[in-house]
């Protein structure tokens, strides 16, 4: 598996990254400071996607494997408009989460000829596996990712450093809340939601992740929102 530098869970870095990929600067990534209603109500609206960063503990890995097997047996069909890609590049989960957040919100403008638009045009009719392989082969996407991975407040990571955290995205497509994780074989549907309730409905799922390993506190919540 190819390896990229890990992205920092820094809203400024991720917002700059989106612009470099071709996303309209009218949209940004912001910190979400907690899960109680008062803090969630302070997040700019509408929240188009919740991006969740969590540690890959043994409990989470076991749950992921079990859930994947259950989804395989159910053979669930998802809307054709849902954009889901597999992850075949180590440390690319931040990029995968941004792709899922943006491309499942078609009202967010992506510039013609940009890195992300070229990827979308080539990937839209492919399977999730083929989309992941296409990303793996994209030198332009890799260069843009790694340029942004060297920004932020922490020291630039070594490409061989062990990374314990993983990014996923939650989006609303056709009235259903989807968890999109490139390391899983399938999207995970979490029931009905609306653009107005996406944030709080996603938080309910995040709390289930946290309950898998109650001793762990290293979680980060980020929102894709209109630029203030």
Image (cartoon, rainbow, N blue to C red):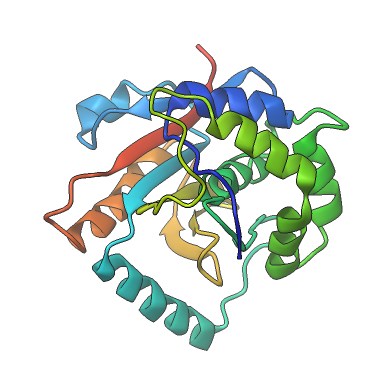
Name the residue: 55% across, 72% down: 185
The spot of residue 40 in percent (x, y) is 29, 29
Name the residue: 69% across, 26% down: 20
Q: Nearer the viewer, residue 62 or 200?
A: 62
Q: In this view, does 13 lie above or below 64?
A: above
Name the residue: 45% across, 84% down: 69
Q: In this view, does 168 lie above or below 18?
A: below
Dividing the picture into quadrants, the one containing residue 209 is: bottom left
Q: In this view, does 215 lie to the left or right of 52?
A: left
Name the residue: 39% across, 54% down: 162
Q: In this view, does 208 lie above or below 152?
A: below
The spot of residue 221 in percent (x, y) is 35, 37
Dividing the picture into quadrants, the one containing residue 83 is: bottom right
Q: Is residue 32 above or below residue 172?
A: above
Q: In this view, does 147 lie to the left or right of 206?
A: right
Q: Residue furthest bottom?
A: 73
The spot of residue 222 in percent (x, y) is 40, 34
């Amino acid at each position: 598996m190819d390896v990229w530098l890990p992205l920092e869970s820094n809203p400024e870095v991720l917002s700059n990254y989106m612009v470099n990929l071709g996303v309209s600067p009218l949209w940004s990534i912001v910190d979400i400071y907690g899960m109680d209603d008062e803090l969630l109500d302070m997040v700019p609206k509408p929240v188009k996607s919740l991006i969740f960063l969590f540690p890959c503990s043994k409990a989470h890995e076991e749950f992921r494997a079990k859930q994947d097997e259950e989804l395989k047996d159910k053979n669930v069909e998802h809307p054709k408009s849902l954009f889901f890609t597999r992850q075949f590049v180590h440390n690319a989960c931040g990029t995968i989460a941004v792709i899922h957040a943006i491309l499942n919100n078609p009202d967010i403008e992506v510039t013609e000829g940009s890195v992300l638009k070229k990827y979308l045009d080539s990937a839209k009719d492919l399977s999730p596996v083929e989309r992941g392989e296409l990303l793996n082969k994209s030198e332009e996407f890799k260069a843009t990712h790694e340029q942004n991975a060297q920004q932020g407040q922490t020291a630039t990571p070594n490409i061989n450093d062990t990374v314990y955290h993983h990014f996923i995205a939650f989006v609303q497509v056709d009235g259903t809340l989807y968890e999109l994780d490139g390391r899983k074989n399938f999207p995970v549907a979490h029931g009905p939601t609306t653009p107005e309730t996406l944030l709080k409905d996603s938080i309910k799922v995040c709390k289930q992740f946290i309950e898998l390993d109650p001793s762990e506190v290293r979680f980060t919540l980020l929102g894709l929102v209109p630029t203030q």
